[in-house]
Amino acid sequence: MRIAVNTRLLLKGKLEGIGWFTHETLKRIVLRHPEHDFIFFFDRPYDEDFVFARNVTPVVFGPPARHPVLFYIWFELRIPYFLRKYKADMFLSPDGLMSLSTKLPSCVVMHDLAFEHYPEHLKASHKYFYQKYSPRYAQKARRIVTVSEFSKSDIAARYKISPEKIDVSYNGAHEEYKPLRWEEKEAVKKQYADGCEYFVFAGALHPRKNILNLLKAFVLFKKRQRSNMKLVIVGRLAWNYKEIEEMRLTMPFKDEVKWAGYLDVNELARVTGSAYALVYASLFEGFGIPILEALQCNVPAIVSNTSSMPEVGGDAALLVNPHSAEDIAQKMELLYKDEALRAKLIAAAPRQVEKFTWEKAADRLWESMMKCMAP
């Protein structure tokens, strides 16, 4: 069988949520199934590290699809041509977009419908594109894969899709995320937090990640607790970050907040694994990989009580109302003052982590691909 795959988000040094899902699942699937040929479609020059085995044929064609107009050209005009040229038997698209212009059996991974719930957080052009085409993709795809039971229910209800057509393939966490020795943690604290304990947030900095309420909560925490606790924020400035920049410069205790920027996976694993706790009060997530990454390091988490995050955090997380800086602050205080509670959450982390592995994710995705090809 010849399987064509949209791999446009495999970008060296720039892998984030969807990119990591694509990388970790495809790497395993390709290696486990040498009897099949895989054609990887890139929209720009690729890194050889993404050619996972000899049964992968990389194909590059433009235009670089980074704008809705270019999305349309790449998926509706270019992809159908290359599907025919390489005589593909099916098309897999791991980033939620697909082609309406091909009759080939297609499997699409829809990670979440955040753009339906928080359209104000997108550029107008992107909001229009996603809201117009995603329902059509959902109807046309032979199989849909998503990354949580929450997202499965959300897609089924909003787009009137039978749940039988939707499969769940949970995310996993990179193997670099693991418990650290005391000496390693102390070295990281010196490097990033003036040698102090710290809360950590990791993710792209844009409105849906709720950074403003996190900063407000940290100010409340510092006002109430006589503590050297820091807040380390890891991630690139994505979009609509003007308010974050303003608050960063004017907030009380601004010197207690450490902005680490984008870190590669090895360094991010060290920073996550050395934290006192993760605080991830995002407004909406299809999964929330940083939560799982923290738990894999035996670091407890404070997470939002919305969307998929309670599903991922399980018994190893405290839940908060992401719209309430007061609630976030109270949970930070509770975790800081109650060492028995923190120990209980840490003890629950390994059991929770067992539910989510990239091996299981690859198996579930492959099963869905095979359903896509079934008569």
Image (cartoon, rainbow, N blue to C red):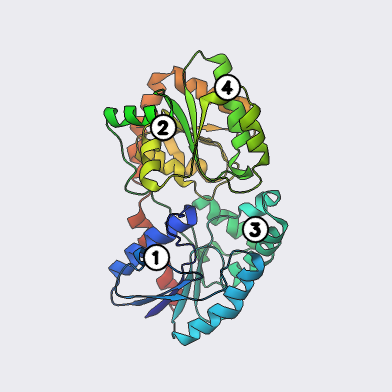
Is residue 147 toward the left or the right of residue 355 in the image? Answer: right
Front in this rendered view, residue 16 or 189: 189
Q: Give residue 13's position: percent from left, percent from top.
A: 43, 54
Badge 4 is on which residue? Answer: 253
Answer yes or no: is residue 98 visible.
Answer: yes
Badge 1 is on which residue? Answer: 47
Q: Which mark is residue 326?
A: none
From the image, state whether disc 3 or disc 1 is nearer to you.
Answer: 1
How far apart are labels 4 and 2 at the CA level? 24 Å
From the image, state whether disc 3 or disc 2 is nearer to you.
Answer: 2
Is residue 104 toward the left or the right of residue 2 in the image? Answer: right
Residue kind at label 3, given as amino acid type: Arg
Badge 3 is on which residue? Answer: 158
From the image, state whether disc 1 or disc 2 is nearer to you.
Answer: 1
**342, above or below 41, in the image:** above
How far apart are labels 3 and 1 at the CA level? 37 Å
Residue kind at label 4, given as amino acid type: Phe
Residue kind at label 1, given as amino acid type: Asp
Badge 2 is on which residue? Answer: 300
Q: Residues within 10 Å of mark 4 (few under 14, many from 20)?
A: some
Answer yes or no: is residue 147 visible.
Answer: no
Quarter placement of the C terminus = bottom left
From the image, state whether disc 4 or disc 3 is nearer to you.
Answer: 4
Q: Which residue is rendered at x = 61% and y = 38% of the image?
A: 210
